[in-house]
Image (cartoon, grey):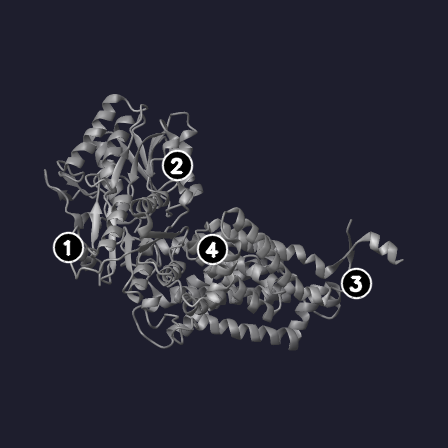
Amino acid sequence: MNRRTLLATAALGLGLSFGGAAEAQMDKVKACFVYVGPIGDGGWTYQHDQGRLAVEAEFGDKVETAYQESVPEGADAERVLTQMALSGCNIIFTTSFGYMDPTNAVAGKFPDVKFEHATGYKRDHPNVSTYNARFYEGRAVQGTIAGKMTKTNKIGYIASFPIPEVIMGINSYYIHAKKVNPDVELSVIWAYTWFDPAKEADAAKAMIEQGVDVIASHTDSTAPLAEAAKTNGAVIGFGQASDMAEYKPSPRVSSIIDNWGPYYVKRVGALLDGSYAQVDAWEGIPGGEVLIGEITDAVPADVKAEAEAVRDAIAAGTYHPFTGPLNKQDGSAWLGDGEVSDDGTLLGMNFFVEGIKGEIPQ
Amino acid sequence: MLILERRPTPSRFWAWGTPILAVILTMIAGGLMFAILGKDPFEAIRTIFWDPLFNAQFAAYSRPQLLVKAAPLILIAIGLSLGFRAGIWNIGAEGQYIMGAICGAAVGLAFYPMEAWFIFPLMVVAGALGGLIWAMIPAILKTQFRTNEILVSLLLVYVAENILASMSLGLLRNPEGGGFPGSRNLGQYPSAANHELIAGTGMHWGVVAAFITVIASYILLQRHILGFQIKLAGQAPRAARFAGVSPNRLVILCMAMSGGLAGLAGMFEVAGPAGQISIDFNVGYGFTAIIVAFLGRLNPVGILLAGLLMALTYIGGELAQFMLGLPSAAIQAFQGMLLFFLLAVDLLSNYRIRVPLLIKEAR
């Protein structure tokens, strides 16, 4: 199966339930979680664990949860998943892109166990669902703040891997910074890791040396904010995945909060009441999966109001962050005036929009 | 007060007794740590050491997994032990493991999607050569320029890691991988895949190679002149020189064997359990193998057992993590304790402990 047909299937499946026979009700569900980092990362994994705790709080005795942290995305993931399935987990959430192949491989061997893979696109078996959040909606709010707040007109983005999810975040961030500040320049550093505080800090340092004064990150730790904090307010940044409130009011001026709890509660609940079915979920600010953390007083009131207006328009469904006219980096037309990107293009996004310097590593 | 008294010859009893004592002490100290973390220590120890082997729910799956996890450790540790016995310290097996994996995978991917019987054997040769050549760098630098092989081999690990990253982002990246770093999955390429030979046993070519290596190195050390020279060079370097052992030749041979075996381990891993070259392909087998080599007393049979024990702590550790909610750091600390206690009680094989008061009375 080539990439194109994969994307087509992904696009088709978007937001749709795949139907299938309704499942039997269950008296008790064991829900298990596989984390890519430690719970104490203060970001991505922390938020998934908050989701797990939300499931426990919601269902009490009717649910048992278990988790394993810092599971490498490779041979070990398959073993961990198999052991979880053997231990009687009814539903297993695998919370990183790199678990895609192991999740599908193990799901094939345990047809009675439900697998939920975060941020992936492969659903090789009827018991594999995928879920993701529209983080690019939050990036639109951050971009607006970044464009307004930068004094050097240089903003930065610490990117993890050159995959569509990250690229759409970069594009959205840039588009909205550019909208409020036509002179803005974006530099992107690829860290090639989800969680490596030392590498993330190095990336932030390099940017600060280049004169970047607003840094967004797509990695899981608080290290970039810790670097920004050393500049005595000259450089600001955003909480990523988690609120990272300990860096309030500056350098953390706002944040994207991944709010997985509602989805986890919904899925475990569906398993309990027998309404569970395979899905490909992709919710964002309107559904509450993506929250914008408090915009602090380090941001002037008018900028704050403008950013909140973007957030509210997205929440109300009246504004889509990828609305034309937009060109691709090479100058070719992508979206016409007022045209809105379809989800399929976003899920396979492998290009920068016009104005971003640098290339996506190929 | 206690007095340490050097034994005229190392105690045979303690040479084999210390690993067992170290395991027992690790269980006690680890149990204390688990208790402080608020978990039942007996349950934790049982989950780590007993459940993977005998728990009805898990054993059928985890027993074969023990072999899968132990095979690379044993392969690498056997190679290292030969050098360690001769006083040649190859600390960079992790790098040789990576280079073996890269070379093996590259050969396999070069033939993709052709199906032919000779691809896998070629990959095996390439894997061994990759590790061997990488080990030749510290070896030749040592014999020609008297550099320190510990430093050079260790630092080359980081070079290898960067080559690995560059390979998974560039040359070997899966063109159909949607921009994500990492090569094609060799597991889905039948001619290159290192699958289980007998379903449900975990037995893949790497496990077979590990067993063969154990036997071969046992024979080498017991029956072959090279084995004698290795042992002699380690125990009495001057005597070895008088006996006509060339130190340079020994350095090259030992580094070649350990590098080649580490490369083989990497190759079997990338074609089998891991499936692909990716940025975080290496998970520290090259370093853990050093523990395994010493835990096994640098003896082939000992290493076989030590490799299985180490694999048990990994798999049992994972079980304990999600069955009991232990943090992953606690499991790592537990494994660290094993090496710590081993080195600590190692003292007993070379020294005797005396209580002075008792000695006086005896006189």
The residue marked by circle 4 belongs to what chain?
B
Which of B170 and A71 lies nearest the eye of the viewer? Answer: A71
Q: Work out how far the residue at label 3 is from the one at label 2, CA to CA, in angstroms.
A: 58 Å
The type of residue carrying mark 2 is Pro
The residue marked by circle 1 belongs to what chain?
A
Q: Earlier in the sequence, mark 3 or mark 4?
A: 3
Asked whether the residues under marks 3 and 2 belong to the same chain, the reply is no
Q: Nearer the viewer, mark 2 or mark 4?
A: 2
Which of A197 and A111 lies nearest the eye of the viewer? Answer: A111
Q: Earlier in the sequence, mark 1 or mark 2?
A: 1
Q: Which residue is mark 2?
A: A224
Q: Nearer the viewer, mark 3 or mark 2?
A: 3
The type of residue carrying mark 3 is Pro
Q: Which residue does the image show at 41% across and 51% down from the upper left?
A: A70
Asked whether the residues under marks 1 and 3 belong to the same chain, the reply is no
Q: Is residue A317 left or right of residue A74?
A: left
Q: Is residue B325 above or below residue B61?
A: above
Classify mark 2: helix, strand or loop. helix
Q: Which residue does the image show at 38% across and 71% down from the upper left?
A: B195
The residue marked by circle 2 belongs to what chain?
A
Asked whether the residues under marks 2 and 4 belong to the same chain, the reply is no
**Tag of residue B160:** 4
Q: Which residue is mark 3?
A: B8
Which of B35 and B176 lies nearest the eye of the viewer? Answer: B35
Q: Which residue is mark 1?
A: A12
Asked whether the residues under marks 4 and 1 belong to the same chain, the reply is no
Classify mark 3: helix, strand or loop. loop
